[in-house]
Image (tube, grey):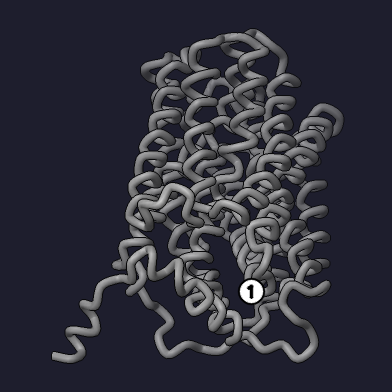
Amino acid sequence: MAEADKRLAPVPSASTLDDKEDEIIKPVFDEFADSEHEEDGWYAWLVVLAGCIQAMITLGASRAHGVYQEYYVIDEFAHAPTAAVSWIGSVQNTMLNLCGVFVGILSQIYDARIMCAAGAFCMGVSFILASFSTQIWQLVLTQGMLYGSAASFPYILGVTVPLQWIRKRRGLALAVVYMGSGVGGMWISMVTRACIDSVGRAWSNRILGLVMMALGVGLAPLIKARRPARRPSKILDFSVVREWRFVFIAAASFFSMGPNTIPYILMPTYVADVLGQSGKLGSTLVTIINVSGIFGRFAAGVLSDRFGPVNMLIIWTLLAAYSQLGIWLPFRSVAASIASAALFGVTGSSIVGMILNALSHQYGVSRITYISGLIYMTYSLSSLGVVQTTTLMLDTVGHGTDYTWPIVYTGLLLVVATVILIVFRIKLSRKLLAFW
């Protein structure tokens, strides 16, 4: 009976969590003992910088896939349905996040540095193999499945290991890490376009593959966990998924992170199909999303440290929905597309990092890689479904040129995510100015 009562004990109220924040988080940090370096010190920020570079070559490259998508749809596979071509990017993004669960499990057993280096090496190999692929199914396997699976290791470890080193400025640290994806998306988009135009698509794959391999493997030694890996008593522990806070965060990530990649994929073809502009404008819009995302992530990190990650996540998700429904949908012009891309870059591209920050505040960081892997799994399933549904809408309802319903669909998903986050925030605390 005592055991049953313990299992059914209610989750502490928001006020209790507020009053005992240090009791919840600090002991988790005290578990980590590193004889050479302290948390929040110079080495901690070196780990953050390494994580930034890993995000640059993984999530950044994924964000730049819109350039390849545009080339495949308009040139290399011009007669293939858009939905068929989109499988390359959607499988890539799905595997990038779906494998986060396995990365989280393995990180409890093996050295993060070795895992990171192995993943980075395989990333480069996948892009080199993609350079020899001439059919869609081959690119789905190489540039999609193999790259996404391999990139998951340096990506997940690069964004979660730094959290073990930072306590006081965790939001800022995550902002710095995820700013790497914006910087990466920016220069990888430009390099990809330049390489395709000058030396062709195959050599662009090879060049990027070698660059990603060199950076990822070279910086892997810095992705050092504060606590040596040791096999837990229970490797597969799904007890957290029954906790109400996790359910809300997972639901919010499902609806907000799923449409996160849509503007990257559709805007390059939108400007060509609807506005009659050149492919260079499409690449420019992807660059605008990534550049504005750099500032958006920094602002989100600073404001989250000041007002709370959940509070800022609500505002950012609502503004991301407005960028789709309030700007991109009603105004069919180059100026509106640029404005929508800029606002979505500031807000939408920051959501994934803000959700991870909210997780760390709710559960601490001792098992953040494993718990975040479960969240990324929901993201991967959502991303695959949303991307395929959106491109199918474009091919069927939109007949390949009407983007109305894909944009509406993307915006409404973000609205649903906003509502979920508001309910979650109310359950945490009814105090309007409380830090959550």
Which residue is at the front of the view, 263 or 321? Answer: 321
Residue drawn at (48%, 34%) of the image: 318
Which residue is at the front of the view, 204 or 214? Answer: 214
Which amino acid does the dot numbered 1 rest on? Gln
* Helix, strand or loop status at disc 1: helix
Q: Residue 64 placed where, x, y %? A: 68, 39
Q: Quadrant of the N terminus?
A: bottom left
Q: Residue 186 placed where, x, y %? A: 76, 38
- Left or right of 379 in this view: 274: right
Q: Which residue is mark 1?
A: 164
- Number of on-image labels: 1
Residue drawn at (62%, 9%) of the image: 333
Residue 119 appears in the picture as rendered: no
Q: Residue 92 placed where, x, y %? A: 56, 48
Query: Vertical placement of 374 versus 393: above or below?
Result: below
- Left or right of 5 in this view: 208: right
Which residue is at the front of the view, 76 or 403? Answer: 403
Residue drawn at (17%, 85%) of the image: 4
In the displayed orientation, state which residue is furthest to the right.
198
Residue 242 appears in the picture as rendered: yes
Q: Residues within 10 Å of mark 1 (few under 14, many from 20)?
A: many
Residue drawn at (43%, 82%) of the image: 235
- Left or right of 58 in this view: 83: left
Query: Vertical placement of 241 versus 389: above or below?
Result: below
